[in-house]
Image: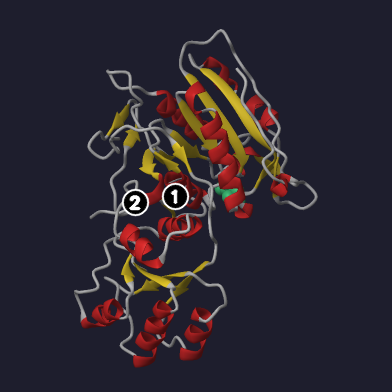
């Protein structure tokens, strides 16, 4: 099986992806593409520095002999060199979407091995970029390298492949959206946040139920999984990164907020407020936000609370933000709002269209 690979532009001069296909033609008729980007799952200790460094996919594969036991045909594609996900950028999201779109008809499902640090950002970004996705794209990784005895990587990888291959009785993919599988839970990608730097249970979806739970059986929550209307996969590639997050705190200074919102080229701000979307009732804050909005800057209100939704009309301290033209971020994650804004700006949408689309779930990223 061949994958079309094109070097689209010279942004990949550092990470020139190279094919490392391990094809087992004797296997059944379920085809999975396993894309290895890097992350702890494929790292080992540098004995000089003591820090974890990435190693290549062949070594990763050598640590998971179980991969050859699947009744599926699994091809692999590796970023070369693999990366720590702290180095993740939109150009690599583009690369992932390009790989998936070019090979969409050849595979039943896609598994992406990714570092945990920015996995939720990548999952959110891909969910917007892969419009009309009707196949599973499952991201996973691990907290301990796969070569370590107590690794969580093997189980995560093996179950992620099972999920990517799973079909309903009528032959459709059991899950057809971008999701994260980690420590027994399958979560919607654009609802997920990394919450633990140590524990195996590293991800949470606070405002949306799990899509599946893996125990002795993998139990799918069919009511929670996205159902599609049909239509062809439409990949999107553009992002505009002129965005930032601004976290409110008691004592935040007027000159700081004014300077931040005055940054040249700034197009959108994710304002992290209190509780159900509340902010100090200072006139300078409302005036600064109004003035930013008049300059075409989109401001989206997200709560610093992990559970629950923004409701600006609930308290007076939220109402004045509504009056200043601030948009509700509903019960979205920060990762989802940021990537959605970068995506909509990249698509060249005007501020009023962005406002409309921020209030419209594109792929289950918030609850209406
Ligand atoms: N720094 C690593 C990464 O995100 C952490 C991990 O994979 O868990 O690539």
Picture coordinates of residue 123, whole percent (x, y):
46, 46
The residue nearer to you, when weighing 52 against 352, is: 352
- Give neighbour class at mark 1: few <14, some 14-19, many 20+ (Cα, 10 Å): many
Image height of 120 relative to 167, above or below: below
Most distant residue in the right direction: 48
Residue at screen point 44% across, 49% down: 124
The residue nearer to you, when weighing 49 against 296, is: 296
Task: Say left or right for 52 vs 345.
Answer: right
Q: Is disc 2 placed on a helix, strand or loop?
A: loop
Image height of 359 relative to 164, above or below: below
Picture coordinates of residue 216, whole percent (x, y):
34, 26
Q: Which mark is residue 124?
A: 1
Residue at screen point 53% across, 48% down: 116
Image height of 282 relative to 326, above or below: below
Q: Is residue 57 visible?
A: yes
- Residue pointed to by mark 2: 365
Picture coordinates of residue 228, whole percent (x, y):
30, 35
**Residues at discs 1 and 2 in contact (Cβ within 8 Å):** yes
Most distant residue in the left direction: 314
Q: Report which quarter residue 186 is drawn in.
A: top left
Q: Is residue 113 visible?
A: no
Q: Is disc 1 placed on a helix, strand or loop?
A: helix
Tell which circle, 1 or 2, labels the residue nearer the N-terminal end: 1
* Count of marks overlaid on the render: 2
Image height of 251 relative to 344, above or below: below
Picture coordinates of residue 130, whole percent (x, y):
45, 41
- Give neighbour class at mark 2: few <14, some 14-19, many 20+ (Cα, 10 Å): many
The residue nearer to you, when weighing 286 against 75, is: 286
Residue at screen point 73% across, 47% down: 10
């Amino acid at each position: 099986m061949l994958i079309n690979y094109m070097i689209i532009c010279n942004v990949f001069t550092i990470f020139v992806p190279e094919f490392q296909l391990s094809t087992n033609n004797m296997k059944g008729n379920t085809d999975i593409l396993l894309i290895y980007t890097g992350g702890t799952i494929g790292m080992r200790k540098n004995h000089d520095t003591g820090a974890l460094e990435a190693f290549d996919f062949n070594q990763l594969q050598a640590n998971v002999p179980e991969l050859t036991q699947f009744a599926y045909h699994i091809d692999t594609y590796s970023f070369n060199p693999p990366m720590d996900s702290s180095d993740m950028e939109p150009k690599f999201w583009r690369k992932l979407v390009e790989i998936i779109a070019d090979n969409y008809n050849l595979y039943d499902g896609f598994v992406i091995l990714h570092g945990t640090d920015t996995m939720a950002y990548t999952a959110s970004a891909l969910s917007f970029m892969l419009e009309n996705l009707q196949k599973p794209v499952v991201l996973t990784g691990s907290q301990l390298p796969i070569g370590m005895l107590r690794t969580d990587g093997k189980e995560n990888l093996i179950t992620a492949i099972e999920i990517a291959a799973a079909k309903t009785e009528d032959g459709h993919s059991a899950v057809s959206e971008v999701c994260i599988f980690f420590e027994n839970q399958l979560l919607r990608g654009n609802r997920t946040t990394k919450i633990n730097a140590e524990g195996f249970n590293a991800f949470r979806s606070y405002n949306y139920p799990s899509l599946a739970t893996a125990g002795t059986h993998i139990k799918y929550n069919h009511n929670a999984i996205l159902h599609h209307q049909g239509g062809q996969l439409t990949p999107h590639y553009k992002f505009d990164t002129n965005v930032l997050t601004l976290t409110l705190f008691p004592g935040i200074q007027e000159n700081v907020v004014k300077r931040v919102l005055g940054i040249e080229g700034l197009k959108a701000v994710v304002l992290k407020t209190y509780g159900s979307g509340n902010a100090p009732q200072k006139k300078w804050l409302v005036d600064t936000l109004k003035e930013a909005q008049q300059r075409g800057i989109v401001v989206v209100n997200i709560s610093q609370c992990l559970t629950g939704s923004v409701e600006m009309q609930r308290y007076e301290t939220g109402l004045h933000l509504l009056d200043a033209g601030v948009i509700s971020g509903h019960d979205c994650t920060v990762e989802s709002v940021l990537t959605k804004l970068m995506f909509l700006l990249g698509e060249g949408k005007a501020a009023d269209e962005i406002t409309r689309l921020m209030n419209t779930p594109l792929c289950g990223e918030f609850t209406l």
